[in-house]
Amino acid sequence: MAQHKIIFTGPVGAGKTTAIRSLSDIPIVSTDEEASDMTANRKPQTTVAMDYGLLKLDGGERIHLYGTPGQERFDFMWDILTEGGIGLVLLLDNARDRPFQDMTFYINAFSDFIASTQLVVGITRMDERQKPSLAEYYAHMKGLGIKAPIFEVDARSTKDVSALIQALLFSLDPGVTS
Amino acid sequence: MSEQPIKIALFGMDERTTNWMALFLIQATKGVCELVPLGGQEVTVVDLDVANSSRIWFDLRRQFSGPVIVLSLHPKELRDAIWVQKPIKADRLLQVLDEIRSMLKRGSNRVDQVDIPAAQVLSSAPPPERNRAFLAPERIVITSGQGDRSERDGTASAAEKVSKAHSLRHEYCGNLPDEFYKDPLHRKDLFFDPALNLLGVFKEAVQRVKSERASMLISGLGQPLVFCADGERVFCEFNLNFLRPLAALPRSEVSIQLSPPYLDPISAESPADPRSQPLDLLLWSLALWSSRGRVPVDTPLDEPIRLKRWPNLTRLPGVPGAMQMAALWYKQPMDLLTTAVKLKLPYRHVFSFYTACYALNLVEIEQIVSLRSAESEVVSDSPQATVQEKAPNRGLFARILNKIGLG
């Protein structure tokens, strides 16, 4: 049976684990640990290896949902994780100090994967901090030579996370219908 | 040849009245009409001799734009409605149904004008614009109310039919049939002039906020509406849905004024205040209510549309197929008519979505882009973005979309 995967990435606290939990048909397998470094300022626990969730499709097909660890020191895993992936969901925390820097980092880190698949960006915590605006994110992303949908999302909302996946798939093939 | 029964739905009646009316219609009209759930009807029957009748009428018109038979003891002056006096007489009802059948036939593929004796058709307002589904003083314009079969499954309950999806299709996208869009004779019906209605006023307010870097007040709506100086939010005391019926009226019929506010509302700068709303939400909603399947005048129908950036579809009212259209226009500009064909969407959904994007300044005509600059060329398009007839993963993607409940 064919196996497929969608990758979720982004900085610590952006909502990757929560987003996967919103979509997954199984209780997510998480590798959260007590944060002991500067990460603890953002959330008490952080993902040290990866998160794993699953979408079970009719006919037995499975879509694996992988969340990358938020900490940059685990970036050696990312190439392995993305192999054979359908696309990349980048979650950015608008309440962080330098969200543009985060965007640049993750787009560069996954540039090969994005070039061969598709990126979609979700901005979380825009209710806490309105700036940068989506228009400013688009402008920044354009400077990086990337075109991708960007939405304001709440990672706890299945509807919002589903919208990200929908945008990802339609960007890959606008002609697809359910 | 026997004719199909007219599909009738009853609205705003209690259970007892509904049962009584159902019995009367079946026995008195002898197969001329049949009762269907709300959403699948061609004609609605409403009793307005009840408490909150104005509210009932308002709710009905939010959901249904076709012909209505109004039952009342006294004459009712309502748009697109035929008044039938109580006590209802079978002959009179049959006569009205016969007239409606003629209208539906003539309007089955197009909006048409049908002469109705003035005694039967009562108008309260002059037509906001020509060729639209509104009453003229001595004439009535009725749309067939026919949607796609997929939009009229007729199986859902009334409550379900008053669902968001129904609203999205009909309130935001109108009910112009696809034939209109293919027929050059109906080309003029596909356009409206935003400058002549509320959308034009609001766009003007946005421009003035931008140029004067100051808040702008819109008065005359009952409650003040302030466009905040930051150019991103509006401040209003009312629910934005209040503007829905006003969106269809010509500017001349809404006595509104645009001016600097006497006092800058302090709360306007606080997004946490429930009276503070995103400007994009206001413009997007108003554009959809104004559009109803049409695009602004002078929009070229045969030139490719490019989406400069995606609308924030997680926070804006959706249009069916919005994700597909956004994905297409963002990476592969395409004209409006071809878009509908390629994506297998009703034309009115494409036109409405374009108008909403236009209101937020998210779209541009590809020809203009190529003449203006080559800056967008630095951004590489993904080769997967084209509408391929047989994309490799289409089946898989469709199954994922089915799984997540969208698409």
Image (cartoon, rainbow, N blue to C red):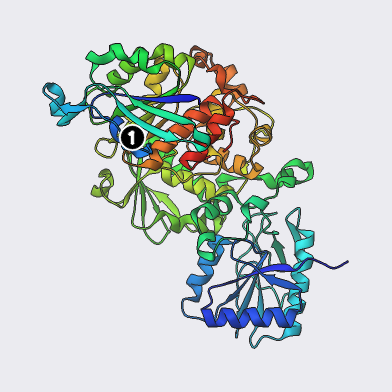
Left or right, residue B348 beside residue A105: right
- Where does the image place residue B239, in percent across and percent down from the top left? 39, 57
Q: Residue at x 42, y 59 (%)?
A: B221
Quarter assignment of residue B393: top right
From the viewer's perspective, is B108 left or right of B201? right
Frontmost residue, B72 versus A90: A90
- Residue B248 drawn at (x, y percent): 56, 55
Residue furthest bottom as drawn: B87
Q: As rendered, which of B3 and B241 lies closer to the eye?
A: B3
For label 1, count other residues whose C-alpha is less than 10 Å away and answer few (under 14), some (14-19) or many (20+). many
Q: Residue A116, image x and y in percent?
A: 48, 15
Q: Is residue B52 above or below residue A54?
A: below
Report the residue marked by disc 1: A19
At label 1, the amino acid type is Ala
Q: Where is B382 relative to A133, above or below?
A: above
Q: Quadrant of the N terminus of chain B?
A: bottom right
